[in-house]
Amino acid sequence: MRKIIHLDMDAFYASVEQRDDPALRGQPVVVGWQAQRGVVCAASYEARRFGIRSAMPVSRARQLCPQAIFVPPNFDRYREVSAQIGEIFRRYTELVEPLSLDEAYLDVTANRRGLATATETARAIRAEIVEATALTASAGVAPNKFLAKIASDWKKPNGLFVIQPHEIDDFLSPLAVNRLPGVGEATNKLLTEMGIATIADLRAQPLPALSARFGKFGVRLHELARGVDERPVTPDRPVQSVSSERTFERDLSLSELAPYLPAMAEQVWPNARDGERVARTVVLKLKTADFRTLTRSITPPAPPASSEALCRLALGLLEKVDLQGVRFRLVGMGVANFSADPSALQAGLFDAAAECAAEV
């Protein structure tokens, strides 16, 4: 049985800003651009008390907390701190799967420090993070990725929660079914119509009934209700795609989706380059109220050069969707088709030419 840790930094972007500027400590800090269509990238816990959340329009955040301090994001700095944290992870295991700048899965079934338990390992990692960065992380420890991710959110901020194998059924049973990944408002409504409110209710449903109603996702629901998740921690994979999605509390019309794309572009853009590779294709994803998934993509002559350019391309794809009257439960956007960065290749050619000239 695997021993998995999910580490999630607490209010990462905002916490970095508060750490680096003592005047921001204890204040409601909102990280985001104050443009007309600016969105919240992150909010400190002081700001969250006012109801401010990531991906919220900055204008709405200002209404909720007029005294909030707005700080533009510094992704170069966040990546630098994230790299520090990643180095700490790899002192304990080579099986590290980053999900973003501020969270990762670790398989510590056999940890490099020879610590007896995954719980002890999580404590040690969190202590090293504090010592090295003055930032806190919350951790979930469990036999698989699904449970570890739920556990890491259980005692936030700066918490540690452990789900032992023999505790899985008792832990999951009373939880509302919408705690499962992929269960948004529309799915939750369908489950409610089936008399399913808790994970225990879901567990009581036969697999054929779930498959008939939800297709492949019905099989996934059947597994998750039993705490089953066989996905391994997969480290060091070349990035194939990066995306951001938003599932809505209520289904939206096509015209209501556009305001959410700038925030997604801002979230995707920092990862649209991977070393000397760059994403060349922009992808738009939509999921209708009846669970149909639609995708549109475009590969421009040159890769997008900014989050704004990325957003413009996604908005262009959205404008070409001809589904008036259809309502949507999810919108997502991302980048794919990573290949060598033309600018990096060009720079390499200039460098080589300079070296040749020097030798001559």
Image (spheres, rainbow, N blue to C red):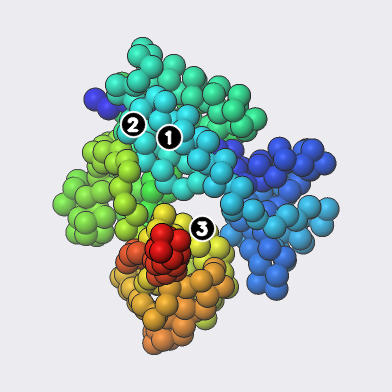
Task: List the single residue furthest toward the front.
Answer: 360
Residue neighbourhood size for the residue with mark 1, other residues' Cα within 10 Å, grouped as few (<14), some (14–19), many (≥20): many
Nearer the observer: mark 1 or 2; the answer is 2
Q: Which residue is drawn at 79% across and 52% down?
A: 68
**Residue situated in front as seen by the camera: 52 or 87:** 87
User: Which numbered disc flags the more N-terminal residue, 3 or 2?
Assistant: 2
x and y percentages locating residue 201 in the rendered image: 33, 42
Disc 2 is placed on an element classified as loop
For residue 94, the mark is 2
- The answer to whether residue 257 is left or right of residue 142 is right
Q: How far apart are marks 3 and 2 (CA)?
A: 24 Å
Q: Does 145 sit above or below residue 351?
A: above
Q: Quadrant of the N terminus?
A: top left
Q: In which quarter of the image is the C terminus?
A: bottom left
Q: Do the residues labelled 1 and 2 touch (CB within 8 Å)?
A: no
Q: Residue at x 46, y 36 (%)?
A: 86
Please state which amino acid type lies under the numbered disc 1.
His
> Can residue 359 be seen by looking at this rendering?
yes
User: Which numbered disc flags the more N-terminal residue, 1 or 2?
Assistant: 1
x and y percentages locating residue 182 in the rendered image: 37, 53
- The answer to whether residue 129 is left or right of residue 216 is right
Q: Which residue is drawn at 57% across and 40% down?
A: 81
**Residue situated in front as seen by the camera: 5 or 72:** 72
* Residue with the mark numbered 1: 6
Q: How far apart are marks 1 and 3 (CA)?
A: 22 Å
x and y percentages locating residue 52 in the rendered image: 67, 53
Please tell me in which quadrant of the rendered image residue 205 appears.
Answer: top left
> Can residue 210 be seen by looking at this rendering?
no
x and y percentages locating residue 283 in the rendered image: 38, 71
Q: Residue at x 50, y 62 (%)?
A: 269
* Residue with the mark numbered 3: 270
- The answer to whether residue 263 is left or right of residue 204 is right
